[in-house]
């Protein structure tokens, strides 16, 4: 019975793929091709983990019908014998803009002279922000590019996922089969393949907001909140963007992060809304692979490994940072590192300048440790899974599309050749497999002389090398239509003599016979006998070098100069015999010990002992609490969100940059904690980030656990745009600034009232933040200069029944110190900055002293990446200007900023139970000769003066080593790039930066 059933199946299988077309045929009498094509005797790799030898693949009408070692051969079959060859699934690129042109940027900046920025959206019926475009359907702008498709096909690809690379939410993409022979309808596998995201604005609009990375993140969050509110039926107006966003929510969600840390930022937004993005990485994931793994995301990884830097000019080579040199050395390991850490990823041609580079990049990644099966999965099954098409793409199985490669040998071997790439059952010839492969080594005998002939390269474009003894002869080979013509110079290099041999390649490819024409014109015969496939000593040596794993330097934390190979760990430390500045009632204690244990200050006193402690002799040295900078702008990838007059929805915590070298430099100045403030682009700025400078940790671990909530406000010239190129945004006057505060706080009160009423409300991140201020759950640190505006904000705060926490800058604080004390607001100021703009003309160096003497909690801050490294010296200036005591002056940069930041229960003084954030100084801490010998955070030494000296030597040695590698790469013929001078990043309150 079983035999009868199988026979019936074979007979009927010719009818299984018949489909009734719904459109008429008006171009003559035609019949549909229902023949089967059978590829037999091949090694078929049905998936990365499955291989069948001497197997057959049967296809019909663009789909796979059967695959296996034993198959039922359909009657109407075309049979192709692939003995000795391999079949693999064609590749899938999940992230391209194939067939779609990105719109050109419209140019201009809100800070350009005479600029006319657009504050509002330009479209009606869509979301309020033009950079949110989920309604975009890539099909509208798509045009199939046959030439580009051929490039992809020649590189091994059968399918690409494409989209419009424009905007923060970019709409849906297309899944396209690279079938140059098919119709548009046949090639289009999906017109809604995925929804795409990025942090980049749309080039189609000049709408200003957002101007920063943190603004883009806040906008994304607000879209998710708004979509939920809208879909619940709460909006009185129609929004086509939010409707499209809701329709797209069940599609794959692909986020173009562009680099490792932006990948973490994207994942942070996704986690908040229970969205798991597929993240398009930057190729630098290897440097923080544990954090990458913690995202639980599937990654799409580019192979744009950096070209070697040209360091042949010793002066220019100094422009190449150690971090860039390391990345050149380590980047090719990225796929391997991801694989070894169990991170699922696909590969993409995205960012490659030329598609022809793809094969060499894959081979390079394999040479740097990537397993070949993993490489194949990253190009087939993983992208199919990302796109939800595993049943149709990525593997060779019944019912899947007939997308496959026919290759000469193992797919990722250096000498492998892709002969054909079949897409939807249509053949694409990449290299003609009917051409006989003549590569190899031969003994060429002409007129009694024996020459060594070596042929390599592509079958249809071979390269010849001929030697006579030790003499290398010039040669040229032509191979076409089975005929070989070889011309080479004579052995006398002083003469221009040529010998030409011509033959037709017959059945015996190991022995050629043909006609030879000698330099004198005489004719003779020649033979070329192929040598056994034995590798010469020189070739063995070359092969050995190729197999040898390249030297890859270890990753540091962070992976730049002064990074640590191991993260510092908390220790039990006993600091012996120091002068201890407690900042408590005990004052300054001579010849005193401090015990640090379990990240806390465990004991302060004389003759302390602990058998588990590492003892540090601090004789002649001073120990203080770590310096705290109340107003900093280091370690952030954005400072201002200038697109609105209030940006309370953004937070600096989103853009903390853990690899900023200024963290290490601050540690070298004894700084252990900082508040990164938003800039002064708007009256209501963004929320702060309070960090511990744990050099080498990721952004999340730098941020204080359960930190007090702060926000930046600003007064004065900046917010009314006195120094901007454009002057169209409200407010334009100081009166307008006051009115803006009143308006926003009234709106916040109304928002809270609605929220408490039980009536459905739209969650507004900006209003949520302002409500926290009204409820005294979030503290204001306000950029300020002149006394009139300081008075104004105090009155606004009293009107709405909250207190301003800190006036920062406050260079006219001495004029209103009594009012500040009465209000309970602190002052964080500069020691002696003045005259850098009009509103600081009345600044005096006695400002800090006068505020302090009036009972105002006073601190000295930096607002500057260079000044922050010497805040101890800045504090010392108040001893000179006003006679503040040394202990109180030190508190200006330790305990007082801790009080202003509401973290004085954790840091700011040497007190048992507080965090072990301390500094060992080589001298009196207020002296210009004092250096931070050791900077300790929670018992871990993050800066050590002796270690720093040793690191300088090791950095120089590592740069020399990498320079030698770079020179070797250049001398071996690899492409190089010139060193590039990088612009310095310098953030202050006065600086406003934008994103494009």
Image (cartoon, rainbow, N blue to C red):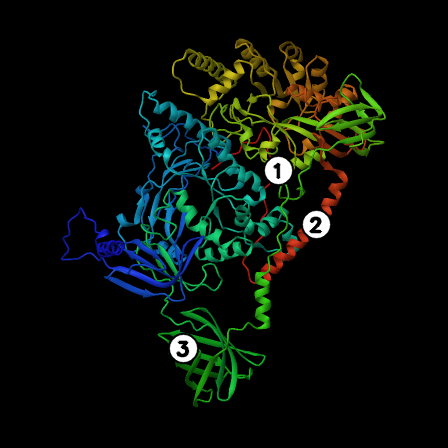
Work out how far the residue at label 2 is from the one at label 3, CA to CA, in angstroms. Answer: 55 Å
Q: Are marks 1 and 2 in contact (CB under 8 Å)?
A: no
**Front-most of residues 382 and 670:** 382
The mark that comes first in sequence, 1 or 2, is 1
Residue 225, image quadrant: top left
Viewer-proximal residue among 980 and 238: 238
Q: Secondary structure at mark 2?
A: helix
Along the polypeptide, which appears first: circle 3 or circle 1?
A: 3
Residue that carries the numbered disc 1 in the rendered image: 660
Q: Is 889 drawn above or below residue 312 in the view shown?
A: above
Q: Position of residue 860 (x, y in %)?
A: 69, 24
Between disc 2 and disc 3, whose residue precedes?
3
The residue furthest front is 1
Which numbered tag is attached to residue 484?
A: 3
Residue at 62% of width from left, 19% of height from top? 807
Residue position marked by numbered label 2 in the rendering: 956
For label 1, the SS is: loop
Mark in the foreground, 2 or 3: 3
């Amino acid at each position: 019975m079983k035999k009868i059933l199988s026979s019936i199946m074979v007979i009927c299988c010719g009818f299984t793929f018949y489909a009734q077309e719904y459109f008429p045929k008006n171009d003559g009498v035609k019949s549909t091709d229902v023949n089967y094509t059978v590829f037999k005797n091949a090694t078929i790799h049905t998936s990365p983990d499955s291989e069948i030898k001497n197997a057959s693949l049967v296809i019909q009408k663009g789909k796979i019908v059967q695959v296996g070692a034993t198959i039922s051969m359909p009657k109407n079959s075309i049979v192709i014998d692939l003995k000795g060859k391999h079949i693999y699934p064609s590749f899938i690129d999940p992230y391209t803009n194939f067939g779609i042109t990105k719109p050109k940027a419209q140019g201009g900046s809100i800070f350009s002279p005479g600029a006319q920025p657009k504050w509002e959206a330009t479209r009606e019926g869509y979301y309020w922000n033009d950079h949110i475009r989920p309604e975009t359907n890539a099909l509208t702008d798509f045009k199939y590019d046959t030439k580009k498709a051929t490039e992809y096909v020649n590189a091994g690809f059968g399918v690409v996922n494409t989209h419009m690379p424009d905007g923060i939410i970019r709409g849906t993409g297309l899944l396209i089969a690279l079938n140059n022979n098919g119709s548009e309808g046949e090639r289009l596998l999906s017109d809604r393949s995925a929804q795409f995201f990025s942090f980049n604005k749309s080039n189609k609009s000049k709408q200003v907001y957002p101007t920063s990375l943190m603004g883009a993140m806040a906008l994304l969050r607000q879209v998710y909140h708004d979509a939920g509110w809208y879909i619940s039926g709460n909006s009185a107006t129609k929004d086509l963007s939010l409707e499209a966003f809701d329709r797209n929510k069940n599609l794959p969600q692909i986020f173009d992060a562009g680099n490792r840390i932006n990948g973490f930022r994207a994942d942070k937004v996704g986690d908040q809304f229970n969205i798991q993005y597929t993240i398009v990485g930057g190729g630098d994931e290897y440097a923080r692979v544990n954090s990458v793994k913690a995202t639980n995301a599937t990654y799409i990884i580019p192979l744009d490994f950096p070209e070697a830097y040209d360091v042949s000019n010793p002066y220019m080579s100094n422009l190449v940072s150690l971090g860039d040199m390391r990345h050149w050395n380590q980047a090719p390991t990225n796929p391997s590192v991801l694989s070894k850490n169990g991170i699922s990823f696909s590969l993409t041609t995205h960012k490659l300048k030329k598609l022809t580079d793809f094969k060499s990049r894959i081979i390079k990644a394999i040479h740097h440790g990537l397993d070949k099966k993993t490489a194949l999965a990253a190009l087939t099954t993983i992208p199919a899974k990302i796109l939800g098409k595993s049943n149709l793409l990525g593997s060779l199985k019944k019912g899947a599309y007939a997308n496959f490669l026919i290759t000469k040998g193992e797919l990722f071997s250096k000498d492998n050749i892709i002969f054909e790439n079949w897409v939807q059952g249509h053949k694409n010839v990449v290299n003609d497999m009917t051409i006989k492969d003549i590569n190899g080594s031969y003994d060429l005998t002409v007129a009694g002389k024996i020459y060594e002939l070596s042929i390599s390269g592509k079958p249809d474009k071979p390269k010849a090398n001929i030697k006579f003894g030790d003499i290398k002869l010039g040669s040229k080979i032509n191979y076409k239509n089975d005929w070989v013509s070889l011309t080479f110079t004579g052995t006398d290099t002083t003469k221009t003599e040529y010998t030409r041999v011509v033959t037709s390649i017959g059945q015996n490819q190991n022995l050629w016979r043909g006609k030879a024409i000698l330099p004198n014109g005489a004719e003779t015969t020649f033979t070329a006998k192929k040598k056994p496939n034995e590798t010469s000593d020189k070739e063995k040596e070359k092969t050995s070098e190729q197999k040898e794993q390249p030297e890859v330097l270890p990753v540091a934390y962070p992976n730049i100069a002064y990074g640590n190979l191991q993260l510092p760990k908390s220790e039990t430390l006993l600091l012996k015999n120091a002068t201890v500045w407690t900042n408590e009632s005990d004052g300054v204690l001579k010849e005193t010990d401090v015990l640090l244990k379990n990240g806390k200050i465990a004991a302060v006193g004389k003759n302390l002992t602990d058998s588990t402690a590492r003892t540090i002799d601090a004789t002649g040295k001073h120990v203080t609490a770590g310096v705290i900078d109340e107003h900093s702008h280091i370690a952030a990838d954005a400072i201002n969100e200038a697109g609105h007059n209030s940006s309370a929805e953004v937070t600096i915590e989103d853009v903390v940059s853990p690899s900023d070298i200024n963290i290490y430099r601050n540690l070298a100045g004894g700084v252990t904690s900082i508040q990164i403030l938003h800039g002064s682009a708007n009256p209501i700025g963004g929320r702060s980030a309070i960090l511990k400078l744990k050099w080498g940790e990721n952004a999340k671990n730098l941020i204080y656990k359960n930190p007090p909530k702060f926000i930046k406000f600003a007064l004065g010239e900046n917010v009314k745009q006195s120094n901007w190129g454009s002057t169209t945004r409200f407010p334009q006057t100081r009166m307008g600034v006051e009115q803006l505060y009143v308006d926003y706080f009234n709106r916040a009160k109304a928002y809270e009232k609605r929220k408490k009423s039980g009536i459905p409300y739209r969650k507004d991140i900006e209003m949520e933040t302002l409500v926290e201020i009204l409820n005294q759950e979030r503290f204001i640190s306000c950029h300020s200069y002149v006394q009139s505006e300081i008075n104004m904000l105090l009155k606004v705060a009293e009107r709405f029944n909250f207190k301003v926490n800190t006036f920062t800058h406050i260079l006219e604080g001495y004029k209103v110190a009594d009012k500040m004390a009465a209000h309970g607001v602190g002052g964080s100021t500069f020691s002696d900055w003045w005259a850098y703009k009009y509103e600081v003309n009345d600044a005096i160096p006695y400002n800090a002293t006068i505020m302090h003497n009036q009972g105002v909690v006073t601190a000295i801050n930096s607002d500057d990446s260079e000044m922050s490294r010497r805040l101890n010296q800045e504090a010392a200036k108040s001893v000179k200007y006003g006679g503040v005591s040394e202990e109180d002056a030190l508190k200006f940069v330790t305990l007082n900023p801790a009080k202003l930041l509401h973290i004085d229960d954790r840091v700011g003084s040497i007190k048992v139970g507080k965090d072990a954030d301390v500094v060992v100084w080589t001298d009196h801490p207020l002296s210009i000769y004092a250096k931070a010998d050791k900077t300790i955070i929670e018992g871990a030494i993050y800066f050590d003066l002796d270690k720093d000296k040793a690191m300088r030597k090791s950095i120089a040695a590592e740069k020399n080593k990498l320079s030698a590698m770079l020179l070797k790469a250049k001398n071996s013929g690899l492409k190089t790039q010139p060193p590039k001078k990088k612009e310095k990043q310098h953030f202050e309150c006065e600086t406003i930066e934008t994103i494009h």
